[in-house]
Amino acid sequence: MIYTRGNFRDYDMWNASGNPGWSYGEVLPYFIRAEDANLRDFQNNGYHGTGGYLSVEDAPYRTLLALAFVKSAQRVGIPYIDYNSRDQLGVSYIQFNTKRGLRWSAARGLLNPIANRKNLHILTNAWVTKVLIDEETNTAYGVEYSRNKQTFTVKAKREVILSAGAFGSAKLLMLSGIGPSNHLKELGIKRIKSLPVGETLYEHPGAIGPVFLVTKPIDNNINFERMITIPNIISYAFGRGPFTSGNTETVAYVKTPYSPYADPNWPDVEIIQVALQAGDDPSPGTENYFHIKSSIMNQYFKPLFNTRAFMYLPLLMHSRTKGSMKLKSTNPYDHPIFNYKYFEDERDLKALAYGIQVAINITGQKPFIELGVEQYTVPLPGCETIEFNTFEYWQCYVRVLTTTFYHYIGTCKMGPASDPTTVVDARLRVHGMKNLRVVDVGIIPTPPSAHLAALAYMIGEKGADMIKQDNGLAYGFSG
């Protein structure tokens, strides 16, 4: 639900690396066109649109902790900004893909209204197993899929377009004979085109915490046990009240000394304030979502159960380490094998530790003190021998409580054919192939300063215009 577009420098770097048409000025119209924005402070600053299919809004409800975070960040010199404008270094309330506090999506806003069109066919419970390719001409002409234990084929009149996500599209390409030669040979897959599919993989690593206690009663703190009241349920029905908060309420973007980019205005760490913390729900579901070991859950988080507490989630936006993805087997139902290679460059680890210290500094300011906020000082299991609150302690903390944000990119990297690390060109066509494109976040060449939902919408919109243009049809924007 978090709606972040990224930094204008992200897109200008894509453009400069051989991807014409992907500069900030050229992608911004797609962000704006999709929006139906309802923002309290930034509605009319020229960076937002109305009337689009995608609802974008501030959370209707703000807790005292969220208000304190924004005020405290400004006290330490972090400006209040619209992070979806040209400036991203600062603090803000999170913009969500919600409508009156209810989750929104492209499916609700774009697909549902046209679901009955005669030229739109949506097949559910179907699993595409490979792309059909004419090996003499390297031309894609359809796909093979399985449904109800039967195999079917679908032929394409013009193009085959893969939009299965960073893992799904890359897996389909490799299963179809498009990928690294050695890997295809290992699995006995006949090679059609040797390309570095899956050899670039980036993620946004992060950490779970630090955690803070609230020692004074706060009526509007987000805690499900205290939220489930008749008045709150009635308020939610009218798009008001704590259930509309989205849980993650505020965000700050900071620049650390460990960023790979010298530009002082290009932040590399995102700090999300979370009203709920892992101790609110010491269930297997929470353990699995955050990938927390049971021993750590029991020793560190369960003592927080039924307390007033909140935590931060620092996220590293520009990882220096590049991972990779491979097929597990030729079985299309097997999940791929991937290795993010988190923290192979220790500067990534230090950047997150630095972000934690920024969060602690913000939370030590007067607006939080007035709410009775105190740092949770129980040593994290595995880091007990390191002095608490030191930079070394927080580096250990990040290693122990590393988490994924599920922001996978790069497996079908976009760039010119002269770049040996790329899979698709700037028009999203697979190098050396005909009638085959990838239109999803897997094409993103470098880690963006954003979560991926907004980028996925933009790539889909821009990709659709490219397809229409290349096939002689009307399209919305040039490029």
Image: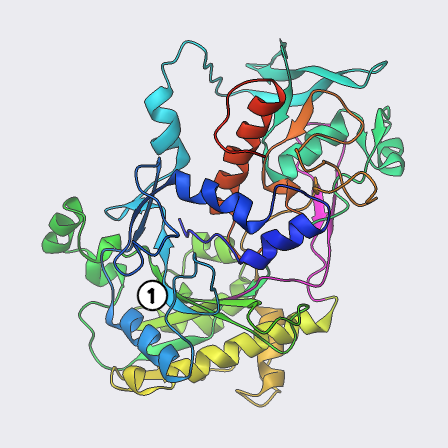
Q: Residue furthest bottom?
A: 387
Look at the picture and state if 57 lies above or below 365.
above
Q: Is residue 341 magenta?
A: yes
Q: How many tags in the picture?
A: 1
**Mark 1: amino acid:** Ala
Look at the picture and state if 62 lies above or below 33.
below
Residue 51 visible? The answer is yes
Choose top left, top right, bottom left or bottom right for residue 433.
top right
- The quadrant of the image that shows the C terminus is top right
Report whether 398 appears left or right of 84.
Answer: right
| Residue 47 drawn at (x, y percent) | 39, 52
Check disc 1 and report the residue beneath it.
Answer: 275
| Residue 319 drawn at (x, y percent) | 66, 62
Tag 1: Cα neighbours inside 10 Å, few (<14), some, or many (≥20)? Answer: many
Report whether 54 appears left or right of 352.
Answer: left
Report whether 295 appears left or right of 248.
Answer: right
Secondary structure beneath dot 1 equals loop
